Amino acid sequence: MNKPLFPTWAIVLLSILAALLLAVAVSIAYLVHNPSVASIPGRLVKKYIDQKVDTIGHAIYLHVLQDPDKDKDGLTDIAEKEIYKTDPTKFDSNGAGVGDGEYVYDVYKKAFDTSDESLLTPYRKNIDSYKKFSSRSTSTNEFLGTGSLDDAFTYRSLQTYNLYVGMPDDLVQTVKKALDSRLKKGDYQGSLELLESALSKDPNSAILKYHLGLTYHGMKQYDQALSIYKSIENDPTVKSPLLYSDIASAELALGNDDAFFRYLDLSIKDFPEDLNQYLTLASYYLDKNQLDKSEEILNAGLKIEPRYASFYNALALIASRRNDTKAEFDLYKKALSFDFRYAPGHLNLSILYDQKYDDRKAAMTEAQISMELERNARHISRVIDLYNEIGQYAKSKALEAELLKMPDVDARSYNDLGLMYMDREDYKQAETYLRKSIALEPRLSNAYNNLGIVLSNTGRNDESAVNYKKAIEINPNYANAYNNLGAYYMDAGRYAEAQAALEKAIQLDPYTYRQYQNLGAVYRLLRDREQMIFYYRKAVELGSKDPAILDYLKTLNR
């Protein structure tokens, strides 16, 4: 009997190999024609990585934030699908002519305009259910569910250069305990002891040194903090916009303005995608009233990220300093067109409606939206102020009680409370709140101006002038402070100084009647009839309803 050319086991093996080769060939051909399927292994790896790293931070960093309608309205993919549940086919700015962000904005405005908050029930319900879902998921998803697009950019700035990726767990726990000690408990000494103990075991750890520097920084021991920061400045483990920002902050606290500029400029050059640095530098220039320089920095930031609402908000504040009300209004609106959920934009728009357009209904609507989006001290205090202006004292009192229990009552919130009591002519309480405001933020020009008004109403005129001048020192373009200072000089019989101050107020803000009215009164005291009539007429044209002036012009048939 002849033996087969190949043994049976060899034939079986060759058959299996042939089948495998055929399968590979077919698979390759299939994947060539179906590249999306070929990327599945890569997608699995990416999914694993995304679970370990801040997905939203890197998504925005890479400019791939989902926007299903492609309408750039500020509502992220998750916000549209899971929270607001808008219909992209119905509310598509490229199709039906209205973006879902605009649609949701209109719903909120209608709810507060008509006092029918039941219109918001589905949105509140969706947000609550999403919060419950996100609490069971990652902190990133929780962030996505509750923040605005603007918050996402801030989150990116903090997390894109993640200092803690790959750090051993024991080190993470040490840093966490140190953070908890100083930030939650205010125990800086405890934080120092923890970090120094850890450094004795790991003296080369840049991250431990960085947190040691942060602890000294929080204790206002800036020289010590700066020494530590500089020792790790070039260590790749911690080299980041966060470290540059901390160095700049410490340098500024020590009065080293040149070093402050140098490090922020270096941060922008080394990490151009980090958006916070543009705002920090622009805010510094704004505080120094170098408006062109502040604007230049913000426009440079917009080239990196044209959707960032905070940049438009900051540009609006510059327009406000220039008394360009139209530009200010348009910029707030632009911020909200990119990000409906940007609460500070609604707040500032509320103030503009109230102070420049005398439209309290629109002001209240925007204030209520800001409070709905972020129920914090600043937004609550704004609503309190407006309730007070329209005489709804019970509502303002209830919110005031809620506000004073909050841990984040800031200078502007106290300023708003001071305004409320000033309007009620409770000058004692107004003064208490305004002085708290100034103590918290010594460069808040509004608080000084308002305190000046309170002091004037309680007969302390010379003190009031000191506060008006302080407000002007902080903000040289503060028209209302010049107007109030002019009124002080007029009452003191110092007419030349009154004229100069009121003319400056008119130059800065030619659209408000009060300074024209006061300047007319100065000319009346100087018995310059023609100038008096000119300024009184201008005041009336701009909205003055002072009966004495109206009767006087009527008598003169002017």
Image: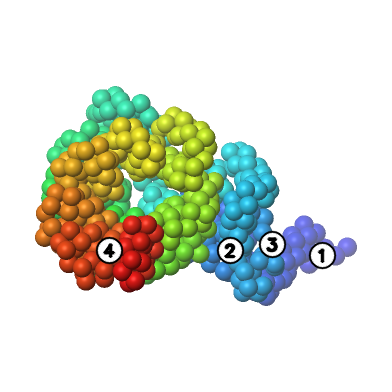
Spatial CA distance of label 1 from label 2 is 81 Å
Q: Secondary structure at mark 4?
A: helix
Q: Nearer the viewer, mark 2 or mark 3?
A: 2
The tag earlier along the polypeptide, 2 or 3, is 3
Q: Secondary structure at mark 3?
A: loop
Q: Crowding near pointer 2: few (<14 within 10 Å), some, many (20+)?
A: many
The residue that disc 2 covers is 102
Quadrant occupied by the C terminus: bottom left
Spatial CA distance of label 1 from label 3 is 71 Å
The residue that disc 1 covers is 4
Which amino acid type corresponds to the residue marked 3 in the rendered image?
Asp
Q: Where is residue 426 drawn, in percent x and y?
A: 35, 34
Residue 516 disc label: 4
The residue that disc 3 covers is 87
Which amino acid type corresponds to the residue marked 2 in the rendered image?
Glu
| Near-viewer residue (16 or 556) | 556
